[in-house]
Amino acid sequence: MSSIITIKSIGNQQDLVINPPSGGLSLQGTIKIPGDKSISHRSLMLGAIAQGETTIEGLLLGEDPRSTAACFRSMGAQISPLNSQSITVQGVGLGNLQEPLDLLDAGNSGTTMRLMLGLLASHSNRFFCVTGDNSLRSRPMSRVVQPLQQMGAKIWGRQQNSLAPLAIQGQNLKPIHYHSPIASAQVKSCILLAGLMTEGKTTVTEPALSRDHSERMLQAFGANLAIDPETHSVTITGKPTLIGQKVVVPGDISSAAFWLVAGAIIPGSELVIENVGINPTRTGILEALKMMEANISLENERIVTGEPVANLRVKFSQLKACTIEGALIPRLIDEIPILAVAAVCAQGTTIIKDAAELRVKESDRLAVMASQLNSMGAKITELPDGLEITGGTPLTGHEVDSYTDHRIAMSLAIASLIAQSSTTIHRSEAAAISYPEFVATLQQLIVN
Ligand code: S3P
């Protein structure tokens, strides 16, 4: 490691110290990023409940998919060790998940818990208990518990059945048409997975389109879906035969976002990020950065097992402020922490609104990004549902904290690269949730 980057371990926590040279640094190179987290979870889950073998190339080998794999192993699926580029899953067949002998631990992963709840609630005559880490046990589960209860599910938990640990007595459910008050792929996917096991047609309508990886993968595994793009509605017909598939997981655009912003804000930088998933429900980050006049181009666009993929090239340019709101928000929901860093470097005042969902992510991402970047000299005002960020003030190194949130840890690391002195990011080990190689890749890209 160069002296620019140092890691200090304190028990099982890590401080990441970033000390840019006085003359500044730039980032140069071509990189691959880890597999898409959303698609990784879904490939493990659908592989586990399908008949026969599923092979998964490029699975994210991060902490969150490990939580999913551990849960489904304890319900009878055979999943090869998550230590290679090619993973195999021997599924149990639809309806055949076994009652686990112990708690199902979703760790830090909201996707694992919320999607799994749809499957568990609909496995009749079996009992399940699900839990997670401190962060996950404080995140709202009523958004999935309530629609599942409308389908007839029996679920108990703290605070009117809204917080994990949750106990589930599986039932034969009845189909519903659920009008979700929020654009959430986790809510939509939970209900679709419950609908898989339910006789008849189950429909979810959402106020704006959220990521559609579940719809794409369910269809690839043999489920019968009807999609109405006008009304943002998806209908699933219950009790199909799901057959194991070959899944190739593209690189995660949410992980690419750190390098897109880093390349755009650090003078002299040019990066190529290969094999990035560019599903239109996820490309809000590209549109936001384009509004900010970033220099980003797409190369070698192609389709890989049902998902669009491209290489992304980014070069430094002076960014301009913009407003990010409305239907764009669900299409860049996980990229708002790193967009806040871009806005700190943009000329003018960037407004992010309609993003109150960020308060119930792995941390309260609005409060944490505002307080941590402000401690480095940024000018950010927290709004109830967003951030107002006046760019152009130089950042100064400071002690900051990830609040154990992977995307906060990595966003603060990118901000530290443009600070005028050394920054220490406490609890930076959180990055391993979605990007175990983040620091190694950063190290590889630094030119000074
Ligand atoms: C995800 C959906 C989003 C996103 C999360 C992953 C998914 O959450 O923030 O990181 O894989 O379905 P919401 O559905 O809560 O918006």
Image (spheres, grey):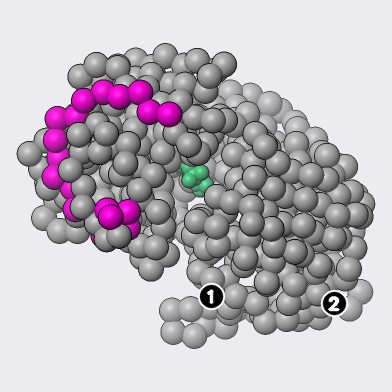
Q: Amino acid at mark 1?
A: Arg
Q: Position of residue 99 (x, y in %)?
A: 12, 46
Answer left or right for 306 relative to 83: right
Query: Residue 162 lies in what quarter of the image?
Result: bottom left
Question: What residue is shown at x 73% (from left), y 81% (from top)?
Answer: 398
For numbered disc 2, what is the local secondary structure? loop
Give the number of the disc on residue 427.
1
* Mark 1 neighbour class, 10 Å CA radius: few under 14, some 14 to 19, many 20 or more: many
* Residue beneath the point at 54% across and 71% down: 403
In-front residue for pair 118/176: 176
Q: Quadrant of the N terminus?
A: bottom right
Give the SS element for disc 1: loop
Could you give the CA–CA distance between mark 2 and mark 1, rounded to whole angstroms?
22 Å
Q: Provide the residue span drawn in magenta.
A: 160-179
Indicate yes or no whether the magenta region holds residue 426.
Answer: no
Disc number at residue 420?
2
Residue type of the residue flagged with mark 2? Gln
